[in-house]
């Protein structure tokens, strides 16, 4: 089916029923919006994506962005999309009215972005980074800088980026060397940044870089990093744009998301690159984390969207491709029978159901985090705001990681559904697999997210965030008393919460003894273990809302629709949740094989 890259009914079910959007809209900050207006937005963005995003998806892969004579040449649709992003409010949606925005809830913005991500994952990053850069300016920069940059960024006239990574430092931001030298009211910036997504592209009027740099004499490590606004072009005394000594020296050709350019930038080669300090010196990393956390959720959302589009493509194929015959009651195939559609084969159904539970569960995870964000800034009660902020903190590394890692496996299963056609360029699954692979690397690798979860988020505030999340899960479990058919699954989830306590008790022993390397050596298996349990909670919640709709004979969707959600939950509890037992055994195992010793193991 044409343009069937998402299931809009499922998206709306998760948004309105499972995550109760109305609770967010009831907050004073969002009272100007209602379900009817949100529905119009969703439908209009889907229509726009059908016409302006999805038709160019494969074309942008076949004709990737490339470096030529100091500039990055991109597909013409990039500039058209940026312009539309300004006109249709894709960029300004999340911003406050006073900043020129629409003041939409984050959960709604993520729903709108998910549709675009699924339609064409090469394009939304250009807008996403512009949003993040503008957010940093509105939160931390002076009024003068806000007035100079934000309006044109929200209008889609100017782009924006975040510039952290350097060749010698990689993800170790404490080792960055880009220098900022005070020069009157500005700073002279000198250094280079790599892997800068959307860092430059032909035709855009200006790009506003948010750059991490070190002022001379600043403390060593991350405590000495400052944040600067460094535009590609700066305004002179007459208000005209002139070059700011920001040079694109190369690009990076990627295996996927090839239409989304990634650049190597040099600042100050001619000693004439000016930057404007954001906030105070040496506070840059703290400021940047506002953008990074939002970007991490966006990466998870993008991965979930790619996996969703791949699921729709493989499901459509399975419903059209006839091959083989079903086994008879004798265990044999009757060659005289007509071939059956491959969706009738149990193993194909298993792979499709795996895709379904990963993609829909991932979208639910994104919505949960986005809702926590909304309530953390808009709830009338201060204690509730603090609660939701802690819940958002502990979920953020999971939102970044689960859709990226499990989404990749889901897409791989989708390719397998197509058999030999799966790896052929005539079919789109191979592109989705290439596109999603980068998600586990963007904005902090899986290893970094896993150490953040176990080393910081689980232990933060003496385990307060974990306690609050456990209370949220137990609340869902307790609600199952009213649903006899779902109660057995609540019991299984309760058992997994107890197992989590056993695992953490075992691991925390190393931290208490100061053996942090051992404590974090299996952080990635812990991420998989904990994420799987979190997703089982979300699926149980989905099943609860589906059963409620069946009990109340809700006609928003068909009976089969709601029953399919319960079936998916049951599949998840059979095929995915039991994996935590083996992971727990790994995590509590006495032997250690990955910490370096004098013994040579790579022979």
Image (tube, helix red, strand yellow):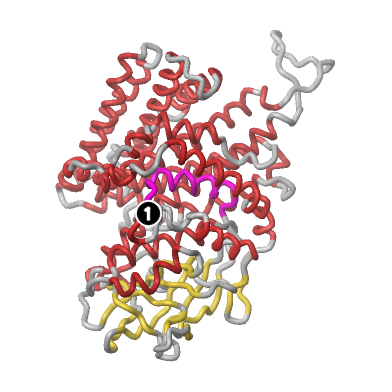
Q: Magenta stretch: give its range.
A: 103-121
Q: Quarter holding the N terminus?
A: top right
Who is closer to the viewer here, 308 or 590?
Answer: 308
Q: Position of residue 382 (x, y in %)?
A: 17, 44
Which residue occupies the foreground of this view, 558 or 596?
A: 558
Q: Residue at x 81, y 19 (%)?
A: 338
Can residue 454 be seen at all in this image of the molecule?
Answer: no
Q: What residue occupies the far right of the structure in this picture?
A: 336
Q: Position of residue 114 (x, y in %)?
A: 50, 46
Confirm whether residue 399 shows in the render.
yes
Mark 1 highlights which residue? Answer: 294
Q: Main secondary structure of the magenta part?
A: helix
Picture coordinates of residue 168, whole percent (x, y)? 40, 73
Q: Nearer the viewer, residue 107 or 299?
A: 107
Does the magenta-highlighted stretch encompass residue 361? no
Could you classify mark 1 by the number of other residues whose Cα lies within 10 Å: few (under 14), some (14-19), or many (20 or more)?
many
Whole-percent x, y for residue 123 in the image: 56, 57
User: Residue at left 37%, top 84%?
Assistant: 274
324 versus 236 height, above or below? above
Q: Residue at x 48, y 64 (%)?
A: 155
The answer to whether residue 480 is above or below residue 296 is above
Q: Quadrant of residue 458?
A: top left
């Amino acid at each position: 089916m044409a343009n069937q890259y998402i299931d809009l009914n499922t998206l709306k079910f998760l948004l309105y029923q499972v995550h109760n959007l109305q609770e967010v809209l009831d907050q004073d900050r969002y009272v100007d919006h209602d379900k009817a207006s949100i529905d119009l937005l969703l439908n209009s963005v889907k229509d726009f994506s059908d016409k302006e995003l999805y038709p160019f998806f494969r074309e942008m892969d076949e004709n990737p962005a490339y470096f030529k004579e100091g500039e990055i040449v991109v597909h013409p649709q990039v500039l058209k999309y940026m312009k539309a992003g300004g006109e249709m409010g894709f960029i300004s949606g999340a911003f406050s009215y006073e900043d020129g925005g629409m003041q939409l809830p984050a959960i709604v913005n993520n729903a709108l972005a998910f549709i675009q991500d699924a339609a064409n994952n090469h394009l939304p990053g250009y807008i996403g980074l512009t949003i993040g850069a503008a957010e940093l300016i509105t939160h931390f920069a002076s009024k003068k800088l806000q007035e100079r940059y934000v309006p044109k960024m929200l209008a889609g006239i100017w782009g924006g980026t975040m510039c952290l990574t350097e060749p010698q430092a990689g993800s170790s931001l404490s080792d960055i060397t880009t220098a900022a030298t005070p020069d009157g009211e500005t700073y002279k910036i000198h250094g280079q940044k790599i892997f800068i997504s959307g860092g430059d592209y032909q035709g855009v009027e200006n790009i506003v870089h948010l750059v991490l740099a070190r002022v001379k004499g600043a403390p060593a490590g991350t405590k000495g990093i400052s944040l600067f606004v460094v535009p590609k072009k700066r305004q002179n005394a007459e208000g005209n744009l002139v070059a700011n000594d920001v040079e694109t020296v190369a690009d990076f050709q990627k295996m996927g998301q090839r239409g989304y350019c990634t650049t190597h930038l040099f600042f100050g080669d001619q000693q004439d690159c000016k930057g404007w300090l954001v906030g105070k010196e040496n506070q840059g990393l703290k400021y940047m984390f506002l953008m990074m956390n939002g970007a991490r959720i966006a990466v998870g959302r993008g991965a979930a969207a790619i996996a969703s589009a791949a699921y729709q493509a493989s499901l459509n194929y399975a419903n059209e491709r006839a091959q083989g015959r079903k086994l008879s009651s004798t265990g044999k195939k009757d060659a005289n029978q007509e071939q059956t559609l491959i969706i009738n084969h149990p193993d194909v159904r298993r792979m499709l159901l795996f895709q379904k539970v990963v993609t829909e569960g991932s979208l639910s995870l994104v919505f949960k985090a986005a809702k926590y964000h909304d309530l953390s800034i808009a709830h009338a009660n201060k204690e509730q705001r603090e609660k939701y902020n802690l819940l958002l903190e502990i979920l953020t590394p999971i939102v970044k990681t689960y859709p990226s890692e499990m989404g990749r496996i889901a897409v791989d299963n989708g390719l397998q559904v197509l058999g030999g056609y799966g790896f052929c360029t005539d079919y789109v699954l191979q592109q989705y697999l290439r596109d999603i692979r980068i998600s586990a690397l963007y904005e902090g690798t899986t290893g970094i997210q896993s150490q953040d979860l176990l080393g910081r988020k689980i232990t933060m505030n003496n385990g307060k965030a974990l306690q609050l999340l456990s209370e949220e899960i137990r609340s869902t479990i307790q609600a199952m008393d009213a649903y006899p058919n779902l109660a057995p699954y609540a019991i299984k989830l309760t058992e997994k919460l107890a197992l989590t306590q056993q695992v953490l008790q075992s691991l925390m022993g190393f931290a208490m003894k100061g053996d942090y390397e051992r404590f974090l050596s299996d952080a990635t298996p812990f991420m998989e273990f904990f994420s799987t349990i979190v997703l089982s909670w979300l699926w149980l919640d989905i099943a609860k809302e589906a059963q409620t709709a069946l009990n109340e004979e809700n006609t928003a969707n068909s009976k089969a629709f709601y029953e399919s959600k319960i079936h998916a939950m049951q599949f998840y509890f059979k095929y995915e949740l039991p994996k935590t037992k083996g992971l727990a055994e790994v995590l509590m195992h006495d032997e250690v094989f990955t910490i370096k010793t004098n013994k040579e193991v790579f022979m």
